[in-house]
Amino acid sequence: MADSQDKNYEDILELNSKIFECKDYDTVLTNIIEYAQQVAQADGTFLYILNSDDYFNLEITRIKSIGLSRNGSDNIALYPISYLPDLKEKNKVSMAEASALRKEILNYANVYAATDFEHNLFKNFEQENNYTVLSCLTLPIISRKGRVTAVAQFINAQDKNGKIISFTPSAQKNLQAIGTLLGITIENHQLRGSYNQLLESFIEVLTKAIDAKSPYTGLHCQRVPVIARMLTTAAVQETTGPLKNFEMSRDDWYALNIASWLHDCGKITTPEYIVDKATKLETIYNRIHEIRDRFEILRRDAHIDYLKKRLANTDSKENLQAEFVSKVAQLEDDFAFIAKCNTGDTPLKDEDIIRLEQLSKIKFIRYFDRTKGLSWAERDNIPDIEAYQKPAYENLLQNRQDLISKGYNYGELYNLEIRQGTINKEERAKINEHIVVTIDMLKEIHFPKELSNVVEYAGAHHERVDGKGYPNGLTGDQMSIPAKIMAIADIYEALTASDRPYKEPKKLSEVLSIMRDMKNNGHIDPDLYRVFIESGVYKEYAEQYISPEQIDEINPEDYL
């Protein structure tokens, strides 16, 4: 007897060891149920799972004598998924259903003698498999909070000679003990599932908040995970070269998914006019209209000057008209130049900067009080209130003191002189700051140990392999492969996007040319970039997410 008890202890310790070593829930569940079947000396087992939404399904079927083994959806034909509350309305339910509803252990030497239950599952199973069910022990698996999470059903207990017998009180007691272990396993799995749902709901809410702030960023947040997943899959499949030993565990995949969704969560603090800044003079609106109005004033002044000269007969009508037409043509040309500078489509040259400086000095007369209609905060930012109240000559393009506020410089000339793109240095710093905010936000989330890489994956997508990136200036050797994958995914989505207000859609050949140059100048990882091209990830994504008008003829070899 003592030897048998010692053997049971050894078996339970071995089972515990398997459970702790194995991270796959289905395998753990199978190990426990097969051990319970062995302890009960049962020929067969049915394990039903009750999920958190009260759906009841047959998860595992094991029949030793006929070598039957079914998991998951393979059992649906035998027992379709049921909604437990609906079963309360039935006149008769099965033993497994009754055990779940009543939290009762049911132990019968002959199941068909128990006429209070319906036995369709057993009858159908017997007919399908030429099998006979006699003894049956049905055990509800109850969580620490008193909720039924599963039902384990053991059939046809056998003696040493293989004869079918009833389940003894001793067998029932042993199964109850194992059922406790089973219950903890299922409960922990369901709690983890609930935690994952909570985390994913948080991600969805945050992404929707960013989406509401800027629909362009929102679409970016949805598409970067797609590219990251595609490229990571291709990298894992590498059998030669520097990436041949690269692998991803289930936790690594989950961490990458979360990181790719949240990599730009810090942009929720970035003003939307900066995120979506389409022109150099844009804040909440495009201030080119203010400058246009000044040109309208200058044109009107030119017209008035012409009419005055006509009245005074200072010159012939033809000469005065020619002078007026010339002035208007020059004003139109000057405004067209300023408007073109405002778009940021073409990098400015030194001569463009000189012309902007010259144009900025053109004067017009302001008659109305500049301080009226301002908030107290705006008035406090004016250095000389009295000067702003009186009529005065003002520059056509202005860099006034009151246009510098809260760390931003809204000066018109200052912004028009941005040499490339539409973002000035203060706005660039604010955009770059979103990475620091992202890292700080994610650090505040107490991720479990298996998801501890989320912060690193999400926070490094603007780092460069040559160490010139931000926020930490990491080199390629200091970054993990998933972090470097995130950088490529972020760049590719941004370059191929057709919905950005600050740039026209680029052809695929243009995008890959830019990325090839980024690979050559130390921006992105060359090994991952090679996989990106050779595996066809760029093409697979383009066919699904890029406008057909952007996809032109590509020879992959040209972009390696």
Image (cartoon, rainbow, N blue to C red):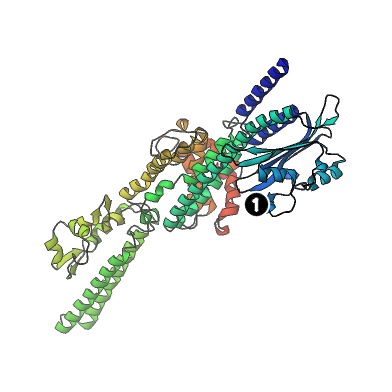
Residue 125 in the image: state x and y as whole percent. Answer: 82, 43
Of 384 and 71, the residue lying toward us = 71
The residue depicted at 70 percent of the width and 49 percent of the height is 81
* For residue 205, side relative to residue 303 (left or right): right
Query: Mark 1: which amino acid?
Result: Pro
Relative to 353, is 455 above or below? above
* For residue 53, side relative to residue 204 (left or right): right
Residue 460 in the image: state x and y as whole percent. Answer: 44, 39
Residue 514 seen anywhere in this rendered image of the structure = no
Of 61 and 477, the residue lying toward us = 61
Q: How many C-alpha atoms fall within 10 Å of the one at disc 1: few (<14), some, or many (≥20)?
A: few
In which quadrant is the N terminus drawn? top right
Q: Which residue is mark 1?
A: 85
What is the tally of numbered marks visible in this picture?
1
The residue depicted at 22 percent of the width and 61 percent of the height is 375
Of 518 and 450, the residue lying toward us = 450
Of 2 and 43, the residue lying toward us = 2
Residue 273 in the image: state x and y as whole percent. Answer: 36, 56
Q: Quadrant of residue 183?
A: top right
